[in-house]
Image (cartoon, coloured by chain):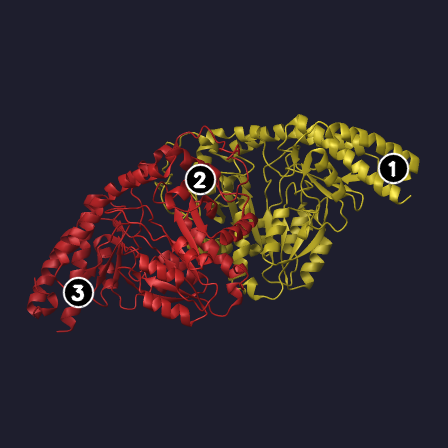
Chain colours: A yellow, B red
Amino acid sequence: MSEWKDDSKEQLLKRKEECRDRYEAIKARGLKLDMSRGKPSPDILDLSNGLLDTLDVYVTEDGTDARNYGVPAGLAECRRLFGELLGIPADQIIIGNNASLELMHNVYSRLYLFGTQGHAPWCKSGAVKFLCPSPGYDRHFAVSQAFGTEMITVPMTEDGPDMDAVEALAAADEAIKGIWCVPLYSNPQGVVYSEETAKRLAAMATKAEDFRIFWDNAYGVHHVFAEHQAPDILRLAREAGNEDRVYYFFSTSKITFPGGGVGIVAASPANVAEQQKHIAVQTIGSDKLNQLRLVRRFRNAENIRKHMRVIGEMLRPKFDVVLDTLERELAGTGLLSWIRPKGGYFVGIDTLEGCAKAAVALAKEGGATLTGAGATFPYGKDPKDTSIRIAPTYPALDELRQAMELLCLCVKIVSIDKLLAGK
Amino acid sequence: MSEWKDDSKEQLLKRKEECRDRYEAIKARGLKLDMSRGKPSPDILDLSNGLLDTLDVYVTEDGTDARNYGVPAGLAECRRLFGELLGIPADQIIIGNNASLELMHNVYSRLYLFGTQGHAPWCKSGAVKFLCPSPGYDRHFAVSQAFGTEMITVPMTEDGPDMDAVEALAAADEAIKGIWCVPLYSNPQGVVYSEETAKRLAAMATKAEDFRIFWDNAYGVHHVFAEHQAPDILRLAREAGNEDRVYYFFSTSKITFPGGGVGIVAASPANVAEQQKHIAVQTIGSDKLNQLRLVRRFRNAENIRKHMRVIGEMLRPKFDVVLDTLERELAGTGLLSWIRPKGGYFVGIDTLEGCAKAAVALAKEGGATLTGAGATFPYGKDPKDTSIRIAPTYPALDELRQAMELLCLCVKIVSIDKLLAGK
């Protein structure tokens, strides 16, 4: 198949007409498909309904009544469970309420309000800037934006953020205080950070002494194809003499229930001590019954891994539909590029320049809602307007097939318009 | 009985010897009694074990799957339940995770970071000061202290804070940005704010345009004796044209489980909209399964009130032990004064000047742990060293009897030492 940019005007018009016909046929079905957010589907949630069963023993291994106040760092057995799962010493782990986003927000907020390890609070600094590998997670960027942090876009590669750019920026500007990272199955491209990338992040010179890596290992055990692992950033940072540089986040939102699980923050011993000091002022203790439910349900890390293999098998056909449809409809056309995701929750695709917004709008009109184009970039503005995020986990397979076909047709129609404008 | 200050040295020495003998006899039992924190006792928690039963329907009234992401303001039926209970429109209520302290901390934090209703963030102001009616709740003061807020002690009366002092301070100093209030069964004295107090708080002139009342109605339905009600501060503030002045907090910690319930913040429509905007950045939604558990368990406000009557009946004998022991051992001695609490979770007592710390230390040595003396004042410093907080809810009745007897003996011994020093 030759690339469509080489087509004649007539060929393009003919292609457009064919696409339009197919588009209208799908639109006529009056579908309401949603590929906008990375939500688990009901059948995935059903796997965890055991969590809702009677919790008839609410006393922890050390005799604490989990119904009552206390234990702000989380139950020992729960810290140990996730320590085992993530390969982190249990005493470097703090268990919070559901939504790791809230834990990130809280840590970010404490850096602004109180500073860290003796450094001045960020709210007392002049400008504060953050590196934002993009496309990235819109909710990370929304946190930075809410705090008035200046966001600096850094390109993504198949090995993680472009480290030459990251190193040059971090070394040059004292106002650059940190970076957002999703190291395993990045949102939205499903990229796995290489060991080399993580090493450079851990060891690089930073002009700001209180430079911080927000390491959101959101998909740490969320394999779809082969089982990869995020580089061990806490170890790498320690070995590089920068152990306080990293805040590591994780949650059970996509393991059990987003609306009733736990969030986790891990860090160096000094950072954990500092966070615990802050947390003790903020709360008398998180929801310990949820912690106990998880411990009773899974007992050990291997059982969580087994559970995630079941979820992976449920997600794989959905990823296959997305990737197969892209391949069938658009491979070789020169209209679309994408990195084959290694796992996680999303697929990121790139249209021709200036086509993403229009394609998403056209898909919406046809019955399929996607994440807003641009959302995966700082300030919601994708400078080249090419990036689209596909979230295939929620819809049922048949819906997903139709939505993907529709999306591909929209990409073609919008791209043809662009090519025609240049003829 | 004549007051002990009028006793001769010899009489006092004799009394001291008697008290010492009784003290040593109790100490010899090797007790480990804890009256330090306002924790519900296991038998109170048992009342709510139904919450742990299977939650077999997790779909809300509008079809939302409560297990999944979303609904950051809380489920409609849960907002309605607590709206009915508290007499607040449901759309002025936001449901958060367990620990209303965290909600207070978050609102406080947002005032510092982002300001409110167009006013400058407090972290950009010079000094920020808060009025702290004392004795008060140590964890409120700990939040202010963590933020570097300058705390100004205001005396408590039997009708709430000394409003002449509050009004004079708030009108004079722009740096005074707010006040901590526990309007019903105040911590630790069990005082109920009068309607007049609340009216003056709602209507008073404040030099700071963004003066805020943190109205922690922590014991809003926690009756022990007669059933009182906190003044309707949201209505009073609205009628006074100051509806954005109030943040109203509540929680189920002492209704069901501290370690697995919900916290609640209510406010004016404009404040609720502002909080929702911030919350949407911070989380994709709180624990909705806990919200649903509460709705399914109680169904309506009247059932919560019935449940609280049962708890009240369990707590009343404990308050009786405390008050009867104080009466029997110390009435008429001139060594101790106290306000008879109208309900709630605590009893506050006042020793002779300079005796509280020593009495608490002596009690600890004898086997009974109390809240640290001074903790109920800003910076943990009770200027006259007179205030002691008794938290009678957790210990069993028999333990409480021994602990109270021990405490009374400690108060006597320490007081006698003080009187002797003046002879």
- Mark 2, residues whose alpha carbon is within 10 Å: few (<14), some, or many (≥20)? many
Residue type, mark 1 in image: Trp
Residue placed most toward the observer, B34 or A10: A10
Residue A118 in percent (x, y) is at: 51, 64
User: Seen in the image, is A188 located left or right of residue A61?
Assistant: right
Of pointers 3 and 2, the one earlier in the residue sequence:
2
Q: Are marks 1 and 2 in contact (CB under 8 Å)?
A: no
Q: Which residue is mark 2?
A: B78
Q: Up-down: is A278 above or below B307?
A: below
Task: Please give the chain letter of the residue carrying mark 2.
Answer: B
Task: Please name the amino acid that badge 3 sits on.
Answer: Ser
| Alpha carbon separation for disc pair 1 and 2 | 55 Å
Asked which quadrant contains residue A318, the reply is: top right
Circle 1 or circle 2, nearest the eye: 2
Q: Which residue is mark 3?
A: B415
Q: Is residue A315 above or below residue B206?
A: above
Seen at 14% across and 52% down, the residue is: B25
Chain containing mark 3: B
Q: Pick the residue in front: B181 or B353.
A: B181
Q: Is residue A182 visible?
A: yes
| Residue B260 visible in rendering | no
Left or right placement of residue A394 versus residue A357 in this view: left
**Circle 1 sits in a helix, a strand or a loop, which is it?**
helix
Q: Which x, y percent locates residue A276?
A: 45, 53
Q: In this rendered view, identify the residue nearer to me: A84 or B184.
A: B184
- Marks 3 and 1 sit apart, C-alpha to C-alpha, by 95 Å
At x 30% / y 41%, what residue is drawn?
B308
Which residue sits furthest front? B239
